[in-house]
Image (tube, rainbow, N blue to C red):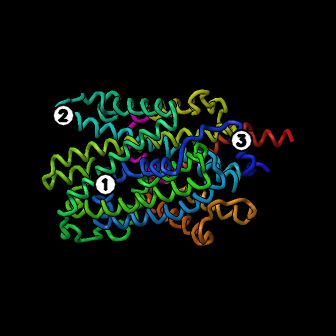
């Protein structure tokens, strides 16, 4: 079998039964989990950057383009998630369909996606919090809010929020989901406040020219804002903690993506309609837009909602990170000891704490910058491979029970691969270099450790 050995669905399910997680989530929990991760950084931060530097008012088309790529991938994900309701999302699906080495490199890139993404979001949360404290008359020294490369000692607020959320995740998935629900309601209220105040102030003259950077700018903007959509992958990582995964996972994945795509398109249109796109390249574009049209109180309310929104993004990203580690550890590809489940809380406490420390250190001492783009390329790669996997399983394992079937799979799966590949193509050259370097390190780790310690490899030798 070698490096392309696959795990059968029955083997995956048996492994989960032996070392599984507490089942506490329903369809609404999963949908809100997805919204919690999708609505946040995308609306409150990335809209401004993408509009000012890449797409202009055609940012609405960028969101449509990214949303379509995600829709194709989400349909494939929904079939796989219902078939294989196990932690690990694309990593687990690829293990069943394409083999261990492909699954490893997908999982390796998902680790990067969640770790770097969490660190970038933690840094963004710290920026909003410091700004809110400043507006309230509390000035925090730059030494404790900036990384060493920017003249500080450490970004302490980013580290504190990372530590706090990792402890919350250890305490329990249900408790974390409850906090997520509350924060999702607050941030959705902030989005609707923005739309209610800014909607009537839209000046269509701000939409001219509509595509100042041409369609290449729209595509580049779509590749950059793709970061905003990775939340539905986090829904898939929750499969093992879902009470009725066959029904609830497809609802959570597709439902959260649909709601968020509609909101993104509306907000992008209103945002570029009330403020010239060139002015939006700042850390808080939505709050800035409200201030620019005279709604200072509305701006403060939206700023508070943005903090709640970014908190839920960070919470779900750190949750997803721990579940990817958990799945890979349970398979023996990384040390198995870190996948222990807490006897009382039913959560993988060791890897959650280790992951939280890693996120805190990266956010506290490393300038994120361009590195955050690695989140996009790693996610797009995982989505494309998972879409190939669903097609392969249709032909190699047609007898498997599929509670949810991807419609027109021979069309949808190739479209998912093509659209994700197109967005990857539009990412900066430097991002590709870093992607290949990170993947090369991953192959090295696999051949030095994972290949020989794989539980599947050991079971084959025993047999």
**Residue 207 drawn at (x, y percent):** 23, 69
Q: Quadrant of the C terminus?
A: top right
**Residue 421 drawn at (x, y percent):** 52, 63
Mark-to-mark CA distance, 2 and 1: 26 Å
State if disc 1 and disc 3 touch (CB < 8 Å): no
Residue 250 seen in the figure: yes
Q: Which residue is mark 1?
A: 49
Residue 356, label in figure: none
Q: Which residue is mark 3?
A: 15
Range shown magenta: 361-376
Residue located at (50% from left, 30% from top): 171
Q: Secondary structure at mark 3?
A: helix
The numbered mark, 2 or 3, whose residue comes first in the sequence reads 3
Neighbour tally class for label 1: few under 14, some 14-19, many 20 plus, Cα within 10 Å: many
Left or right: residue 256 versus residue 280 is: right
Residue located at (17% from left, 46% from top): 297
State if disc 3 and disc 2 touch (CB < 8 Å): no
Neighbour tally class for label 3: few under 14, some 14-19, many 20 plus, Cα within 10 Å: some
Q: Which residue is mark 2?
A: 136
The numbered mark, 2 or 1, whose residue comes first in the sequence reads 1
Mark in the foreground, 2 or 1 = 2
């Amino acid at each position: 079998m070698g490096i392309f050995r696959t795990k059968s669905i029955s083997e995956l399910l048996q492994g989960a039964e032996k070392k599984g997680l507490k089942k506490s989530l329903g369809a609404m929990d999963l949908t809100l989990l997805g919204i919690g991760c999708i609505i946040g950084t995308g609306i409150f931060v990335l809209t401004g950057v993408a509009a000012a530097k890449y797409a202009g008012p055609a940012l609405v088309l960028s969101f449509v383009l990214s949303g379509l790529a995600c829709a194709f991938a989400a349909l494939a994900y929904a079939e796989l998630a219902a078939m294989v309701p196990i932690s690990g999302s694309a990593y687990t699906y690829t293990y069943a369909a394409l083999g261990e080495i492909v699954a490893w490199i997908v999982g390796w890139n998902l680790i990067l996606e969640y770790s770097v993404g969490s660190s970038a979001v933690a840094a963004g949360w710290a920026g909003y919090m410091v700004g809110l404290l400043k507006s309230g008359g509390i000035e925090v020294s730059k030494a404790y809010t900036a990384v060493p490369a920017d003249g500080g000692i450490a970004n302490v607020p980013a580290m504190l929020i990372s530590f706090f959320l990792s402890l919350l995740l250890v305490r329990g998935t249900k408790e974390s989901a409850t906090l997520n629900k509350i924060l999702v309601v607050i941030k959705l209220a902030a989005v609707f406040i923005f739309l209610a105040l800014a909607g009537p102030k839209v000046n269509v003259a701000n939409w001219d020219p509509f595509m100042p950077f041409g369609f290449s700018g729209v595509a580049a903007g779509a590749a950059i804002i793709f970061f905003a959509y990775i939340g539905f992958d986090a829904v898939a990582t929750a499969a093992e903690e879902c009470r009725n995964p066959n029904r609830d996972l497809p609802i959570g994945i597709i439902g959260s993506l649909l709601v968020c795509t509609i909101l993104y398109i509306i907000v992008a249109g209103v945002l570029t309609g009330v403020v010239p796109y060139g002015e939006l390249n700042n850390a808080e574009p939505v709050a800035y837009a409200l201030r620019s049209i005279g709604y200072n109180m509305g701006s403060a309310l939206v700023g508070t909602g943005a903090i709640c929104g970014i908190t839920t993004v960070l919470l779900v990203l750190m949750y997803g990170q721990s579940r990817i580690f958990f799945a890979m550890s349970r398979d023996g590809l990384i040390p198995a000891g870190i996948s222990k489940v807490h006897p009382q809380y039913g959560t993988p406490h060791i890897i959650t704490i280790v992951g939280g420390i890693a996120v805190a250190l990266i956010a506290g001492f490393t300038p994120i910058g361009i590195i955050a783009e690695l989140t996009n390329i790693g996610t797009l790669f995982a989505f494309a491979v998972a879409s190939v996997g669903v097609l392969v399983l249709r032909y190699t394992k047609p007898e498997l029970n599929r509670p949810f079937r991807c419609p027109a799979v021979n069309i949808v799966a190739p479209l998912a691969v093509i659209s994700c590949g197109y967005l990857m193509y539009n990412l900066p050259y430097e991002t590709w270099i870093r992607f290949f370097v990170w993947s090369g390190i991953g192959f090295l780790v696999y051949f030095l450790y994972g290949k020989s310690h794989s539980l599947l490899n050991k079971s084959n030798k025993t047999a």
